[in-house]
Image: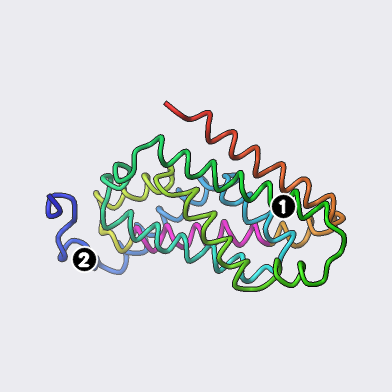
Amino acid sequence: MISSILPSASNLFEVPPLAQWFSISGTTMVVIFLAELGDKSQLVCMTLAARHRPKPVFFGALLAFVFLNILAVVFGAALSTWIPHNVMIYIVATLFGLFGVQTLLASEEDDDDEGEVEIKSGRGIFASAFLLIFIAEFGDKTQIAVAGMASAAPPMTIWLGATLALALSSGIGVLVGQRFLKRIPMNILSKVTGIFFLLLAALALTQLT
């Protein structure tokens, strides 16, 4: 069973000629980057970076994508069958819903120094970014696309191109959040962010079959 799902070790670590490596990785990077523009993962990076320090947000998102792409190239299209579709939707909706409620509640609190320290701790921001991106993107169209491409080309080239594309997409989201959204007063931004995550939760539930 497992052997029918996993690619052989020789295929997984296949190293193509340098020109082919750049060609495949470059094509993958362009395709995945364009697919992620304006996607929910980039919007999550924007909203988190507008409220918190950018580095933990970026590296949390990047680590999530590294793991997601590893799973995609190793397990291929079988990845989407690990967890039933509706179960995954409930998990995503619950996570976004909880984060949205937490953010709305935080917006109503007075400036509490201890609360701000906890919210802005590097580990907490990193963990939030990692968890939100990992759960939201698990089995998403981008990961399935990576899995499909990895079944038809050397997996390592696909992994590299996809990871670079998602790193760039996340970086742009973090930059936009820091440069533009951060100018919005914190209490208003927190309310907008909370509503945004609640909308994502509702949107996820509409995909139930």
Identify which residue, 149 or 7, lies in the foreground. 7
Image point (30%, 69%), residue name:
18
Q: Earlier in the sequence, mark 2 or mark 1?
A: 2
Q: Secondary structure at mark 2?
A: loop
Answer left or right for 33 relative to 174.
left
The numbered mark at residue 103 is 1
Q: Label 1 is placed on what type of residue?
A: Thr
Q: Label 2 is placed on what type of residue?
A: Glu
Q: Which residues are magenta?
A: 158-174
Specify how the rendered protein is coloured: rainbow
Answer left or right for 15 relative to 91.
left
The quarter of the picture where residue 141 lies is top left
Image point (42%, 57%), residue name:
162
Percent across and percent down for residue 26 are 42, 58
- Please tell me whether the stretch drawn in magenta is mainly helix, strand or loop: helix
Q: Which residue is mark 2?
A: 14
**Total count of labels:** 2
Percent across and percent down for residue 60 are 54, 66
Q: Secondary structure at mark 1?
A: helix
Q: Is residue 163 above or below residue 138?
A: below
Percent across and percent down for residue 70 are 34, 61
The quarter of the picture where residue 61 lies is bottom right
- Quadrant of the frame with the C terminus: top left
Extreme-top residue of the structure? 209
